[in-house]
Amino acid sequence: MNPSSSEDGTIALCASSELVDGGRAVSFDVCFAGENCRAFAIRFEGRVHAFLNRCTHVAMEMDYQPDQFFDDTGQWLLCATHGAAYRPDTGECAGGPCRGGLVKIPLSESDGVVHWHTASNLQPVEFDS
Ligand code: FES
């Protein structure tokens, strides 16, 4: 059971104030295509975006320090391993060894809360209790 989920497939992720433009990400877990993965949400140019934390070069987590994905300019999301760069709004590969774009997770923001949206291949992780 996930106490923060609702029947329409939107799941509360964090407070809007936790996501600062070009700043630290908020990480969360998803089950993507039957596999448990890390994901992260960021804010860029005022809007919130989320992606699987899985580089398209080698399927590894990308943050060089926990929840740090942006480069110094706050314009690109970087993979720490070999320096692939992704666009923060679309996840598209913008340079380096990436092969295609990051998997995007739909988000919405209302009343000061950010939610992520499930899809047929994107579900909350079931925790054993
Ligand atoms: S694993 Fe990300 S650039 Fe190589």
Image (cartoon, rainbow, N blue to C red):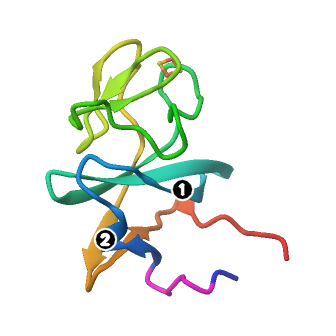
In the rendered image, residue 20, in percent from the top left (x then y), is placed at 28, 58
Q: In the shown orientation, is residue 104 left or right of residue 34?
A: left
Q: What SS does tag 1 mark?
A: loop
Amino acid at pointer 1: Asn
Q: In the shown orientation, is residue 11 left or right of residue 75?
A: right
Please give the name of the residue rendered at 54% of the width and 82% of the height, measured from the top-left corner. 5
For the record, the magenta segment spans 3-8
Q: Is residue 25 above or below residue 83?
A: below
In the rendered image, residue 92, in percent from the top left (x then y), is placed at 28, 32
In the rendered image, residue 21, in percent from the top left (x then y), is placed at 23, 53
Whether the residue carrying mark 2 lies under 8 Å from ligand 1 is answered with no
Label located before the other in sequence (2 or 1) = 2
Provide the major secondary structure of the magenta segment. loop
Q: What SS does tag 2 mark?
A: helix
Please give the name of the residue rendered at 33% of the width and 61% of the height, measured from the top-left corner. 19
Between 17 and 108, the one nearer to me in the picture:
17
Residue 4 is covered by the magenta coloring: yes
Report crowding for label 2: few under 14, some 14 to 19, many 20 or more residues within 10 A (C-alpha): few
Q: Is residue 34 above or below residue 84?
A: below
| Residue for badge 1 | 121
Q: Which mark is residue 79?
A: none
The quarter of the picture where the N terminus appears is bottom right
